[in-house]
Amino acid sequence: MPTSNLKQKTTRGLIWSFIEKFSMYGIQFILGLFIARILEPSHYGLVGMLAIFMAFSAIFIDSGFARALIQKQDRTEADFSTVFYFNLIISLVLYGILFFSAPLIANFYGEPQLVLITRVLSLNFVIQAFNIVQLTKLAIEMDFKTRAIINTFSVLISGVLALVMAYNGCGVWSLIAQTLTKTGITILLLLFIKRWMPKLIFSVSSFRSLFRFGSKLLLASSLSSLMYNLYSFLIGKYFSAKQLGYYTKSLYFTNIIASTASEVLHNVTFPVMSSVQDEQERLTNIYRKLIKFTMFIVAPALLGFALISEPFIRLCLTEKWLPAVPIIRWLCLARLFIPINSLNINLLNAKGYSGLTLKIELIKAPIVITSLIITIPLGLKAIVIGQTIVGVITFIIYAYFPGKIVHYGPMKQLKDMLPTFIATFIMVLAVLPIIRLVPSDFLKIILGIIVGFTVYTLVSILQKRAEVKEIYTLLVNLKNKYFSKK
């Protein structure tokens, strides 16, 4: 693909993928604030107790086949149909396992109501199996506009339903209904817009071909998800549902920034990197620019939110959620390198090194487990501090292996991020007096955002950052395309 066409498709993909995530998280964020004001932290804790089972099962339904389809250059209709039927069979098997395991899960946590909650929430896997191939086809075509429209509508409708149910005293079932409704509406919209139906084909040769690549990603994703959700699993076991609720909600807020960037980059850059996997210099240039640009956006956003978290929680969620503030602040630091890790993994997968992805997760696992063994007896705050330390160590691991392939390892990546860290540090110094001296929570938030944004932008301009020019050019192009008179 010519460089100009690839850049145009990448830019368009990033824009629409960002719009998708911004719309999704924006709607969830606003409606979630109202829902959280009604519900108790323990309601979120009950759902959080099932996070590890839900995430682990979701990975098995995909089985790495979605990324295998994207990475494969000569994919056929038999490939798509085979993946569809395999996902459906796996989802039914997993639902059966969770259905009959529900009493054991409830006994483990000492929460009898988890029996019914597990059996109902697990239905989401069966529903999800119907949309994986369609969403993968949209990613291959880099049609993130359609994906943005579908997800925005599904999040809006499911969020409104959850708010109405919470207001009418449905408690934790408001959150469960939100999850199931979102997936169901997504399927209906995909059927209406995409109009893809599987053929009556299950190709054994296609399955074997995709499984060779996807099986390693399945194991890597399973390990990664296990380590990520191990925190919620053990907090739910050794602490109260209320404390797990604080952790779950804190993770949600920090993920709005970190995971939005990570998911946008994963969805767009994997097909882009796969399309130029045989052009080493071109691939490396794209990879390096993305890392610099990503940290330029993520670092000030995460640390800025850490600064305003206390007035934000007090103003928006009421004082019953204030114990979440220190957790949010540490998680902002812990999630700092998550989007960069996503880019590093995408490079490996695009080049076909799914085995290295698995190797990274095998190295990471004992680090996470050791951190939890040390910090659990010390309390919830110690756990998230340990998570921050693990985040720094795992960044080095994630960056090391791609660095060996394209000669752009952790030290070179950190060197490119250094100007961003300097500008962010100056921004923090400028905002701190506002947070400490201004009496009104509302003014703390507004002035903090204005001053932080202004200071960060000015320092970046003085640093002559290319990212400032790129954002300016992008905004001008968007203005000319969508708002200028014809």
Image (spheres, helix red, strand yellow):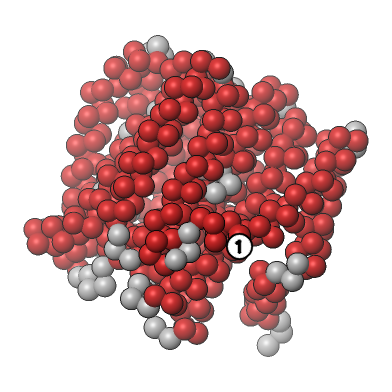
* Residue 111 position by quadrant: top left
Residue under the image location 75 percent in, 49 percent down: 425
Q: Position of residue 154 (x, y in %)?
A: 48, 50
Is residue 182 depicted above or below 479 in this figure? above
Counting every numbered tag in the picture gives 1
Q: Indicate left or right for 177 with 25 as reference.
A: left
Q: Position of residue 481 (x, y in %)?
A: 64, 80
Q: Which of 209 and 398 lies nearest the eye of the viewer?
A: 398
Tell me, yes or no, if residue 297 can be seen here.
no
Q: Indicate left or right for 63 with 442 as reference.
A: left
Say what amino acid the circle numbered 1 marks.
Asp
Disc 1 packing (10 Å; few <14; some 14–19; many ≥20): some
Q: Indicate left or right for 169 with 445 as reference.
A: left
Is residue 271 depicted above or below 107 in this figure? below
Is residue 130 depicted above or below 284 in this figure? above
Q: Which of 182 and 215 lies nearest the eye of the viewer?
A: 215
Q: Position of residue 438 (x, y in %)?
A: 90, 37
Q: Secondary structure at mark 1?
A: helix
Q: Position of residue 263 (x, y in %)?
A: 48, 54
Q: Which of 365 and 50 lies nearest the eye of the viewer?
A: 365
Q: Indicate left or right for 221 with 43 as reference.
A: left
Q: Quadrant of the N terminus?
A: bottom left
Which residue position holds label 1? 416
Residue under the image location 65 percent in, 51 percent down: 299
Residue under the image location 43 percent in, 86 percent down: 2
Q: Quadrant of the C terminus?
A: bottom right
Tell me, yes or no, if residue 460 can be seen here.
yes
Residue under the image location 68 percent in, 81 percent down: 480
